[in-house]
Amino acid sequence: MTTMINLLPWREERRKQRQHEFIAMLAFAALLAGLIFWLWKGMVEGQIADQQTRNNHIQSEIAKLDTQIKEINELQRRRDQLVARMKVIQELQGNRPTIVYVFDQLVRTLPEGVYYTLVERTGDSYRIE
């Protein structure tokens, strides 16, 4: 019987096969890492774009609100002016009977032959000459 001896360099072939598999796995891992990075980068850029859109919308709303605030302040200023005018008118109308009463009393208390040369009102006080 003859024995068969394998003289082929099987270890070298096995080492080359493993090295080839390692390089293939390394290339696959690098490709997968690149794909994951590309997807992650796209996702982050999308989020940044969305946030920028929201920021622009908020800025435009702030500008609108600033305009409305200016209008409100102007309306409040005009309202305060109108309220002040109304107070003056109410005071004048409220003093109308008082003025009539004062002149009536001046006429009644004035003796005959005496004349007033000056009747002046300042606030709530009167000056008579």
Image (cartoon, grey):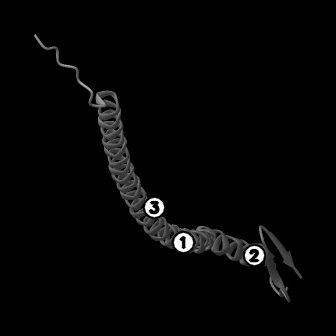
Name the residue beneath numbered marker 3.
55
Name the residue beneath numbered marker 1.
70
Mark 2 nearby-residue class (10 Å; few <14, some 14–19, many ≥20):
some
> Can you give x and y, in whole percent of width and height, for residue 42 in the image?
35, 56
Q: Residue furthest right?
A: 129
Quadrant in the picture for the N terminus? top left
Q: Which residue lies furthest to the front in this view?
A: 1
Residue type highlighted by circle 2: Leu
Estimate the spatial distance between the alpha carbons at disc 3 and disc 2, rounded to whole Å.
75 Å
> Can you give x and y, in whole percent of width and height, for residue 86 in the image?
55, 71
Q: Looking at the image, tell me whether mark 3 or mark 1 is earlier in sequence order.
A: 3
> Which is more toward the observer, 63 or 79?
63
| Image position of 84 with respect to 9: above or below | below
The disc at residue 103 is none
- The structure residue drawn at horizontal position 54% and vertical position 72%, both measured from the top left corner, is 70
Is 79 on the left or on the right of 42, as rendered? right
Name the residue beneath numbered marker 2.
106
> Which is more toward the observer, 42 or 57?
42
Residue type highlighted by circle 1: Lys
Q: Circle 1 sits in a helix, a strand or a loop, which is it?
A: helix
Q: Are marks 3 and 2 in contact (CB under 8 Å)?
A: no
- The structure residue drawn at horizontal position 40% and vertical position 54%, both measured from the top left corner, is 41
